Amino acid sequence: MNDDYVRIFDTTLRDGEQSPGATMTSAEKLEVARALASLGVDIIEAGFPAASPDDLEAVRRIAIEVGNADYNGKTPVICGLARASVNDIDKAWEAVRHAAKPRIHVFLATSEIHMKYKLRMTREEVVQRVREMVAYARQLCPDVEFSPEDAGRSDPEFLYYVLGEAIQAGATTLNIPDTVGYTTPEEFGALIAGIIRNTPGIENCIVSVHCHNDLGLATANTLAGLRAGARQAEVTINGIGERAGNTALEEVVMALYTRRQFYNLRTGIDTTQIYRVSKLVSNYTGIPVQPNKAIVGANAFAHEAGIHQDGMLKHSMTYEIIRPETVGVPQTRLVLGKHSGRHALRARLASLGYQLSDEELDQIFARFKHLADRKKVITDADLEALVSDELYQP
Ligand code: KIV
Ligand code: ZN
């Protein structure tokens, strides 16, 4: 893999499943894992095996079935999350060890607030636990990821030290979480740059970013982290996750793709499957996608304003920066409503088989505008009714 390759680590089945009400059955998780593998994600975080026997079993099944299959020439790494404890690491290993490429992901908090109030541990105790647990995971599994939880609010000097110790103990990927979505893109980018500059041994590891969306900055922070040198992005489909969610896979992938001349980075994602996988995850989790959601929302490729529709009819690039087919959306929708103009109305009527003279169009357009004042969206059936009322009345 070249230096411009960004690994996509999908945590829909772990952090995403932590969204309130998002629980999926084992069979649904397996189906989502298959869809993620076919989408081309590099690493699937399949769950948190110590959380419950069901979780362990779901991760084990994914490791066996998805972690040994070929998806367009690629088999994803299957990862299980573990707190920094022997019990959690054993459970994670029990679940992922069946995969051709297993990974154990160990985490422990490093911010003052988490160490003092949640862990009730001193800095020295945290460092000692990281050393011991990363080393323990590493003697089970050749691929170990370590995350200093709440890194976004941790003392950077302390982070460099903890991360250096994790590397010495055998960590191969260092993931930097902005656990509570607190940082700004400038801060997060600088944090990643500082870690890469100051952590001993980091040149032999992959640096990863994991952002939450509490301030709506998860995608911007992730992209800032990648610009600063991270080469793994942790994401979820539709951005589902704890509280305001995680970074959305579709946003990062499409930003890197659409602005490739700016970022000079690439992923292994088959973008044409994005919309299908988004729908699958929304159906299984019961979490609807907001209509104006970037890339996968129902309105992401819909245009209502007359000026926009007119532009779109002349050239699609006037108001669309991505072709809908690129993400698997069948086509652009020109929604007819009160903001629409004559040009869009004529085009829609033509697609329904009505070739109208200018005079006929004027008559229909006037009635269409009256109807649109009362009704939010004008359907094809409404148009048919308007035309037959206006033009075919005896
Ligand atoms: O947000 C977070 O800190 C996490 C870690 C477990 C990586 O999800
Ligand atoms: Zn998280």
Image (tube, helix red, strand yellow):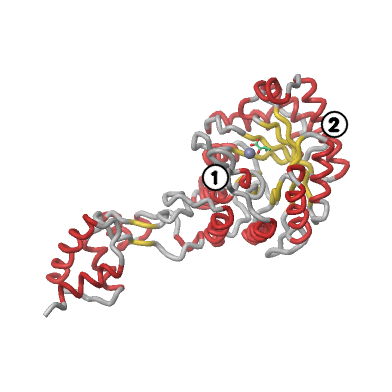
Residue drawn where x is 41% and y is 57% of the image: 301
Left or right of 243, for residue 376: left
Q: Quadrant of ligand 2?
A: top right
Q: Examine the image and state in which quarter residue 206 appears.
A: top right
Residue reaching furthest bottom?
A: 394
Which of the two residues, 223 or 380, is positioned nearer the viewer here? 380
Q: Which amino acid does the dot numbered 1 rest on?
A: Tyr
| Element type where label 2 sits in the image | helix
Write down the residue under mark 1. Answer: 263
| Mark found first going from the N terminus, 1 or 2 | 2
Left or right of 343, for residue 263: right
Q: Where is residue 103 drawn, in percent x and y?
A: 77, 47
| Element type where label 1 sits in the image | helix
Write down the residue under mark 2. Answer: 132
Mark 1 and mark 2: span between their CA atoms? Answer: 38 Å
Residue drawn where x is 74% and y is 57% of the image: 62
Q: Where is residue 262 drawn, in percent x and y?
A: 51, 45
Label 2: few (<14), some or many (≥20) within 10 Å? some
Q: Examine the image and state in which quarter residue 60 appears.
A: bottom right
Q: Where is residue 6 drawn, in percent x and y?
A: 64, 47
Q: Which amino acid does the dot numbered 2 rest on?
A: Glu
